[in-house]
Image: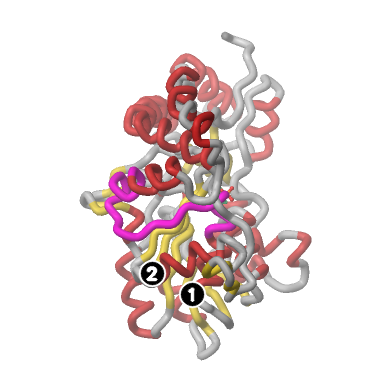
Amino acid sequence: MENETILVTRSSMPDLDEYVQEIACLWDTHWLTNMGEKHVQFEADLKKYLQVENLALFTNGHNALECVIEAMGLSGKVITTPYTFASTTHAVVRKGLTPVFADVKPEDYTLNPASVERLIDEDTCAILPVHVYGNLCDVDAFEALGRKYNLKVIYDAAHAFGVSRHGVSSASFGDASMFSFHATKVFNTVEGGAVCFADPALKDVLNQWKNFGITGTESVEYVGGNAKMNELCAAMGICNLRHLDAEIAKRKVVYERYMSHLQGVPGITLPAAQPGVQSNYSYYPVVFEDDFGATRDDVYAALMALDIHPRKYFYPLVSEYECYQGRFNPADTPVAKHVADRVLTLPLYADLALEQVDRICSVVLGCGKEA
Ligand SMILES: *Cc1c(COP(=O)(O)O)cnc(C)c1O
């Protein structure tokens, strides 16, 4: 136990027997993909869980995001955040749109609506905020901006599955929200993703875009790609969804153990709880400020030396990626730059032992000047 490797996350999995029982019927039907019975059932289960009317499943979150951008027929500039995973910006660029980076808020690292509004011009078609670490964006402000300037609001909700505000699901904000069911996320289908959306007319279009643009047995109307979730992944989702609330409850215990050690420590900034928001405890980000007595990289090295694997997530900023060299200036988003240079997400998963959390925290605190 003492010396075992601790990775930043560990995928939740159902009991093998439960999964085998779920997929057994596929050996009768030999129907493995193309919206089979597991796909149909999983979509219905998810709509219920997320309290939404409109949802489409995908191979992964990234393809879901590309598909919804495509299905909405967007062109021009998209205002988004550099404090995110590669996928958010790459989807914009790969669909031929131009990303414009606004800054984030220091409290929760989500996109700052005031910073967004300053950047809106006649070429802007959409705002693409990210619910970072499961912290909800200022959804009311983005709704108002969308209405005022006639812009689409698409959320990257990859971190926010199972999050709600005053009982309202994170899936119900904006024109669309993308979820990722990647193995490393709170809820997984091995690989997978979904889009929830407001306009029911998008359903057929999304289903067609994810299936080569095929609109009928003898008609192909769009140059679509292939992004259909298969039956084995849908079955994994059906099983994992049954246990999700229990998994989130276990994460909460781990999260609170971290809080008990790290809250109030000088030089450490932790995300503030958002009023009225039910969290999914997806990540435990720690920002090491300059007065902590050790840098983020010092803490990272100390943990790695003990075979404990935190992640510099999100670092570097997307605006600093080699592939975007010369296109953006990270100094334009000083809050995002400050956080990216100092953040470390500590290991967090449902089955992480509390004694391991204690051990991780003692290493972290041992790096600081208070030690
Ligand atoms: C995981 C993730 C994605 C991409 O999801 P995939 O399912 O891996 O394609 C996009 N955005 C954010 C913020 C993510 O964390």
Q: Nearer the viewer, residue 300 or 350?
A: 350
Question: In the picture, residue 42 is in which quadrant?
Answer: top left
Question: In the picture, residue 150 is in which quadrant?
Answer: bottom left
Which is nearer the N-term, disc 2 or disc 1? 1
Q: Specify the label residue 72 is tagged with.
A: 1
SS class, disc 1: loop
Whether disc 2's CB lies below 8 Å from ligand 1 is answered no
Residue 67 in view here:
yes
Residue 158 in view here:
no
Q: Specify the label residue 33 is tagged with.
A: none
Q: Where is residue 92 in the image (x, y as percent from the top left)?
A: 60, 69
Residues in magenta, as a range: 45-64
Question: In the picture, residue 255 is in which quadrant?
Answer: top left
Q: Where is residue 74 in the image (x, y as percent from the top left)?
A: 53, 78
Q: Is residue 350 magenta?
A: no
72 w.r.t. 366: above or below: below
Q: Which amino acid does label 2 sit on?
A: Asp
Q: In percent of the image, x 44 and y 40: which residue is there? A: 38
41 w.r.t. 215: above or below: above
Label 1 crowd (10 A; few <14 / some 14-19 / many >=20): some
Q: Position of residue 193 (x, y in %)?
A: 50, 50
Q: Which amino acid does label 1 sit on?
A: Met
Q: Where is residue 268 in the image (x, y as percent from the top left)?
A: 49, 40
SS class, disc 2: loop
Are the residues flagged by discs 2 and 1 in contact, CB closer than 8 Å? yes
Q: Is residue 214 left or right of residue 280?
A: right
Which residue matches tag 2?
175
